Amino acid sequence: EVGCFTVDPGFSATASCASGITFIDGEQGILLYRGYPIEQLAARSNFLEVTYLLWYGKLPNESQLQQFTHEVVHHTMINESLRLFYQGFHHDAHPMAVLVGVVGSLSAFYHDYLDIHDQKSREMAALRLVAKMPTIAAAAYKYTMGQPQIYPKNSLSYAGNFLHMMFAMPTQPYEVDPVAERALDLLLVLHADHEQNASTSTVRLAGSSGANPFACVAAGIAALWGPAHGGANEAVIRMLQEIGDAKNIPKYIARAKDKKDPFRLMGFGHRVYKNFDPRATIIRETCYQVLEKLADSRDPLFELALRLEEIALKDEYFIERKLYPNVDFYSGIIYRALNIPMSMFTAMFAIARTAGWMAHWMEMMADPELRIGRPRQLYTGPVMRDYVPLEERK
Ligand code: SDX
């Protein structure tokens, strides 16, 4: 039974929480969304169906899925005044910085419709966030490119709409490539939720104070940005570009093992998985298909990543510490094949994880016994002492 556990009776600090949304067995490399194996959802479901599953705890029937999709599709536009918000950013602002700011500003748009103690009102806020994230993220990209922001198109799928808003231009027709659409939807499914990771815990902690859900998600986006978390997908590609050639791999493996060197093998290791991250395995296999169909079957960085994994997994240091590729190790290869720029990789993660953040926020806010999160500390500072007047200090 998953439940709150205390770090130490003396401190009675709850270090985790109970949730029925996602189950991870780190030793076995098992990941379930509401009991369904990620492998089956990756092969047979889609992002909006998985979002519905994460939120409501069951797979939707046909009319429920149609209704949910209709609701999401009809909330993809952002208020026109929000488009002015982008003008305040420098043209080379990192899309994650834009996302933190713009998503946080949504708190100023919906406060009068929002009663966080009302389930329908909570669901509406969650739905608006999932619906608008692709529009907000694509607009951030267009802004940095100096191109006009593209409005969402209700006739397109969730993933297709994002690709359309990213790459369409007013000057010529744009066709969504079905291979790219399917690959992107798969990545969204794989990134949708992952139990109490740093950014989800951030959203929960912020939400436990009764804060506005848009502000909570802005906090989650900020936490996700770090290279130790969602920012790793961008850091992996930078690392592979720096390694450049397979002959340099031993040098970087040595650096990753050197405690004096801050370098870590990006995309490797995990707080929970001490076996293969099942998402990494699915993404690696998907790379072959996507490269075959979208990128004339080659990406030197993919071949380098495969070689790096092969060498690292034979190295005592990685074997002893059970360090395996995680979800971020190969995802950038697919984003590259979709022509999504590296600066947008973590924004892609944020789009997907909004589904999980909202599932956790709604689960938590529905708890009538909800109390504010308040982790305690192990105090290591000085014992009590008296103030020393300035003239008596050495
Ligand atoms: C995500 O929590 C989630 O669920 C996150 C996530 C999600 O879906 O939300 O799965 C997404 O954030 C995946 C992780 C992406 N981050 C990276 O790929 C960055 C590189 N990875 C490392 O920074 C690290 O593995 C972490 C941050 C992921 C985990 O750090 P920990 O908890 O310190 O790792 P650990 O306790 O398992 O480390 C054990 C040992 C330590 O060395 P020793 O002190 O035992 O000698 O392994 C070492 C670590 O220093 N180690 C690494 C390493 N990762 C851990 N050494 C070299 N390279 C690495 N990548």
Image (spheres, grey):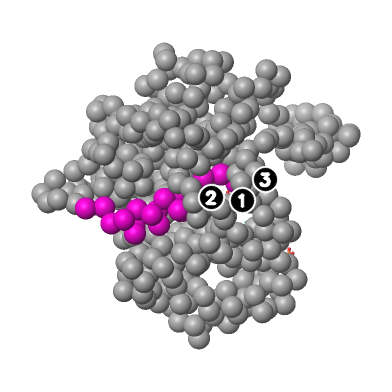
Magenta includes 298?
no
Residue range of the region highlighted in magenta in the rendering: 175-195
Amino acid on which disc 1 is placed:
Pro
Amino acid on which disc 2 is placed:
Leu
State the CA–CA distance, disc 3 to disc 2.
14 Å
Determine crowd level at label 1: few under 14, some 14-19, many 20+ residues with C-alpha closer than 10 A: some
Determine crowd level at label 2: few under 14, some 14-19, many 20+ residues with C-alpha closer than 10 A: some
Task: Work out whether residue 386 or residue 373 is closer to the camera in this orientation and state it.
Answer: 373
Report the residue at 82% width, 40% height from top: 7
Which residue carries the number 2 mark?
41
Image quadrant holding the N terminus, namely top right
Which residue carries the number 3 mark?
23
Residue 267, by quadrant, is bottom right
Q: Are marks 2 and 1 in contact (CB under 8 Å)?
A: yes
Residue 308, by quadrant, is bottom right
168 with respect to 68 (left or right): left
Of the residues under marks 3 and 2, which one precedes in the sequence? Answer: 3
User: How many labels, in total?
Assistant: 3
Query: Residue most toward the front?
Result: 62
* 240 lies above or below 347: below
Per the image, label 2 sits on a secondary structure element best described as helix
State the CA–CA distance, disc 2 to disc 1.
7 Å
Which residue carries the number 1 mark?
37
Q: Do the residues labelled 3 and 2 touch (CB within 8 Å)?
A: no
Of the residues under marks 1 and 3, which one precedes in the sequence? Answer: 3
